[in-house]
Image (cartoon, helix red, strand yellow):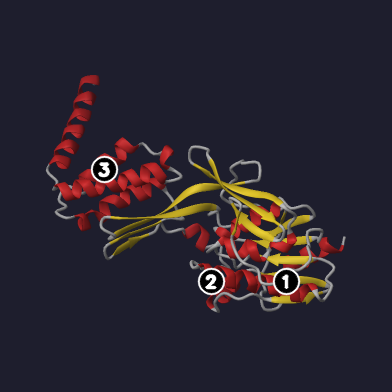
């Protein structure tokens, strides 16, 4: 039996080698370079038995004549990594692992609010300031500055009404660029380091901090705030999270979770609390978006990819009738104590 098993393994190895050897050089180079990117940069690459995955890929790609015909084969690697934050684009094809479990957690209220586009909603409720922070897609520095000041100015307006405490709602924050979010929320924080990113090998990078009302990464101010306001670092804050809180939204929740006199309410977040990076290759015809680092706390400890609230509250969201929103009301009860 041992002889038969070893013979079978040898046949599999030979067939994989033959399939690889028969491929055009352009195809082999494309597959190898794709796998090199995934092995070196994916947050989950250390968990993969790459020799087995490579055999499956080359077997699937054995009839490929051009790099564009390797798309289905390379999907095998993406499925093996299980990265639900990732995306794979090659020529006219694109692929993301479907996150059905998360999609089933979205309420009709969340879907309806998202359909209206990103907005900051502010309100004074029972003497407390309420502000929702939406997802923010910003790439250019001008947009980062604009969105940061948008949040900052809304906080300033609310603060002029002398609220007894604050509610920061992240339930509609599906991610985007974290820099304008934290730059706009800077008044709520004392000076100091708040987070790092931790790569698959445990290395800490991108030191995030607040300094004199600015948000910095590695000491560099990330957004120019036009008019600073007085510090609100002693304010009592309730932060609301849920399944719609994802990616950078989860990063904001992680930063608030380390803040004194702050408590998180709601439901578990999306489970995408990590950092992504993009890789363009194959003469710019291929693109990988990969999770490349965990979010770490101020002590360089890698944190779970889902944020759990201090107080779990399940109930109907009511973004356009906050007086009937069960999570908002629970947060107010705590703020009053």
Distance between the Cα atoms at labels 3 and 2?
Answer: 44 Å
Residue ranking furthest to the right: 337
Q: Nearer the viewer, residue 98 or 200?
A: 200
Element under disc 3 = helix
Residue 317 visible in the picture: no
> Which quadrant of the figure contains the N terminus?
top left
**On the picture, is 178 further left or further right than 298?**
left
Q: Residue at x 19, y 28 (%)?
A: 10
**Picture layout, residue 38 above or below residue 132:** above
Distance between the Cα atoms at labels 1 and 3?
Answer: 54 Å
Q: Nearer the viewer, mark 2 or mark 1?
A: 2
Q: Which residue is mark 3?
A: 56
Where residue 103 appears, as percent x and y from the top left, is 50, 63
Residue 155 badge = 1
Element under disc 2 = helix
Q: Residue at x 55, y 79 (%)?
A: 116
Q: Which residue is mark 2?
A: 143
């Amino acid at each position: 039996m041992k002889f038969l098993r070893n013979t079978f393994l040898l046949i599999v190895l030979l067939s994989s080698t033959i399939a690889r050897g028969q491929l055009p050089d352009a195809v082999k180079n494309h597959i190898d370079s794709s796998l090199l990117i995934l092995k070196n940069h994916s947050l989950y690459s250390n968990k993969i038995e790459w020799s087995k995955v490579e055999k499956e890929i080359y077997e699937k790609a054995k009839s490929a004549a051009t790099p564009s015909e390797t798309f289905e084969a390379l999907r095998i690697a993406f499925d093996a990594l299980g990265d639900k934050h990732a995306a794979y684009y090659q020529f006219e094809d694109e692929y993301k692992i479907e996150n059905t479990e998360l999609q089933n957690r979205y309420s009709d209220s969340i879907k309806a609010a998202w359909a209206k586009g990103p907005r900051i909603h502010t309100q004074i409720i029972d003497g407390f300031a309420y502000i929702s922070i939406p997802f923010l897609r910003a790439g250019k520095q001008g947009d980062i500055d604009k969105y940061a000041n948008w949040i900052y100015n809304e906080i300033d307006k609310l603060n002029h009404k002398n609220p007894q405490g604050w509610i920061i709602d992240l339930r509609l924050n599906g991610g985007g660029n974290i820099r304008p979010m934290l730059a706009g929320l800077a008044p709520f924080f004392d000076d100091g380091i708040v987070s790092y990113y931790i790569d698959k090998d445990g290395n800490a990078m991108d030191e995030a901090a607040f300094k004199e009302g600015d948000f910095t990464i590695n000491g560099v101010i990330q957004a120019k705030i036009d008019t600073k306001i007085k510090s609100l670092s002693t304010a009592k804050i309730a932060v609301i999270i849920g399944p719609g809180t994802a990616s950078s939204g989860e990063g904001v929740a992680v930063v608030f979770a380390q803040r004194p006199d702050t408590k998180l309410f709601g439901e578990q977040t999306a489970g995408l609390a990590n950092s992504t990076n993009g890789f363009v290759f194959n003469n710019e015809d291929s693109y990988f978006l990969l999770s490349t680092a965990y979010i770490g706390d101020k002590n360089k400890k890698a944190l779970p990819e889902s944020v759990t609230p201090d107080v779990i509250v399940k109930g109907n969201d009511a973004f356009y009738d906050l007086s009937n929103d069960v999570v908002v009301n629970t947060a107010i009860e705590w703020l009053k104590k």
